[in-house]
Image (cartoon, rainbow, N blue to C red):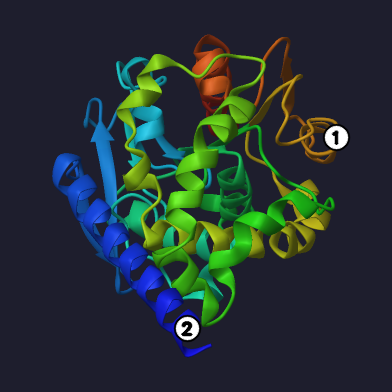
Amino acid sequence: MRGGLTLAAGLLAGLWLDTRRRTNRAEQEHPPTGHFMSVGGTRLHYLDHGPKDSASPTVVFLHGNGTTAGDWTLSLLDEAARHRRCICFDRPGHGYSEATPRRDAGPAAQAALLRAATRKLGLERPIVVGHSLAGAVALAWALDFPEEVGGLVILSAFTHPTPRPDFLPFMGPAIPAVGPLLSHTVLPPLDRLILPPLMRRIFEPNPVPPSYNELSPDLLLRPTQLEAAADQLAALIPGVAAMAPRYSEIRCPMAVVAGREDRIVDPHAHAVPLHNAVAGSTLHLLAETGHMPQHARPDAVMAAIERVERAMTSTSAHAEA
C-alpha cells in the first residue's frame, strides 16, 4: 500500500514538473505581442491594431473559451483593422491575461471587467464581436451597459440554457481543491492527446486551417488557462439562464452569425431564438460552415460587421434629425 502511494506521488510530481517545464518553454517561445493594463486589480493583455484616429470605428473582439486573442490574428484581424481600430482582449485567465476569482467567471462579470478596460482605453460605443462563449459576454455587456455598446456581432454563440453533458469532462479543473492538482498533472498530457481530434470537431465540416499550427498546444494547456476555461464553462449555463429573458431589451444594431453545420453549438437552439428575441437583429446562417466562421467564412463575418456599422450610422443620423 505504502509503495503504491509512493509511486503515485512520484508520478504526480513528475507530471507537475513536466507541466511546469512545458509552460515555461511555451511562454519563452511565444511571448506576449500586445499591451498590458490593470483594471480592478486584474492585469489584462490585449492587441491594438488599426488606425487610432477618433473618426475610425472601433471593434472589440472577444475570443471563445480555451483559446486566446491570437485566434483573431489568424483569421480576419488584418482585414478588419484596415479601416477601423480593433482591440482583441485575452479574456481573463486566457493568453497573458490574469484570471479573476471564480466568483467572477460568469458572462456578466467578464463583461463588466472588459467594459472597464475599454473605457480606460478611451473608447466609446464600440462594436463588440463575441465568438462562442464570448458571445454571451458580449450580450451581457449590451444588457448591463446599453448606452456604451454601439453594436453587436454574435458568432456561433451559446446563448440559451440548453443541457450540455459534454461540458462535464472539461470542467475538472473547476472542482474545488482537486482542480488545480488535475490541471498541473494529469490533464495537460491527456488534453494534448485529445486536442487534435477536438480541433477537427470544432472546425467541422471545414478543415483546421494550417495557420492554427502557430498556436502552441502547451500555451493553450497551461494550468491557469485550463482552470479559467473550466470556471467560465461552469458559469456559462447559469449565466445565460439569467440573461435570456432579457434579450428583448437589446436595442443596438446586432448581427447574429452561425454555421448551419456547427457541431459545437446548435444554431437552431441558440442563434435562431436569439435573433427572434431581439427586434431589428439580422440572422446569417452560413451553409457548409461549422463553429469557426471567422476562419471558414471571414467574408461573411466582415459583412456582418460592416452591416452593423451602417446601422449605427443610420441610427445616429436619424437621432440627430
Residue 272 visible (yes or no): yes
Under mark 1, the amino acid is Asn
Q: Is residue 107 left or right of residue 62?
A: right
Residue at 49%, 68% (x, y): give it: 182
Residue 108 occupies quadrant: bottom right
Q: Residue 146's spot in the image, x, y percent?
A: 59, 52
Q: Secondary structure at mark 1?
A: helix
Q: Is residue 237 left or right of residue 225?
A: right
Front position in the image: 151 or 88? 88
Q: Is residue 250 left or right of residue 177?
A: right
Q: CA distance from mark 2 to mark 1?
A: 57 Å
Q: Is residue 75 left or right of residue 310?
A: left
Up-down relation of residue 208 to residue 89 (above or below):
above
Q: Residue 145's spot in the image, x, y percent?
A: 56, 57
Front position in the image: 304 or 46? 46
Residue at 19%, 45% (x, y): give it: 32
Front position in the image: 51 or 318? 51
- In the rendered structure, find residue 5 and report the number of the disc placed on it: 2
Q: Residue 4's spot in the image, x, y percent?
A: 49, 80
N-terminal label among 2 and 1: 2
Q: Residue 22's spot in the image, x, y percent?
A: 26, 51
Residue 276 occupies quadrant: top right
Residue at 50%, 19% (x, y): give it: 208
Report which residue position mark 1 lands on: 276
Q: Secondary structure at mark 2?
A: helix
Under mark 2, the amino acid is Leu
- Residue count near mark 2 (Cα–Cα under 10 Å), binned few <14, some 14–19, many ≥20: few
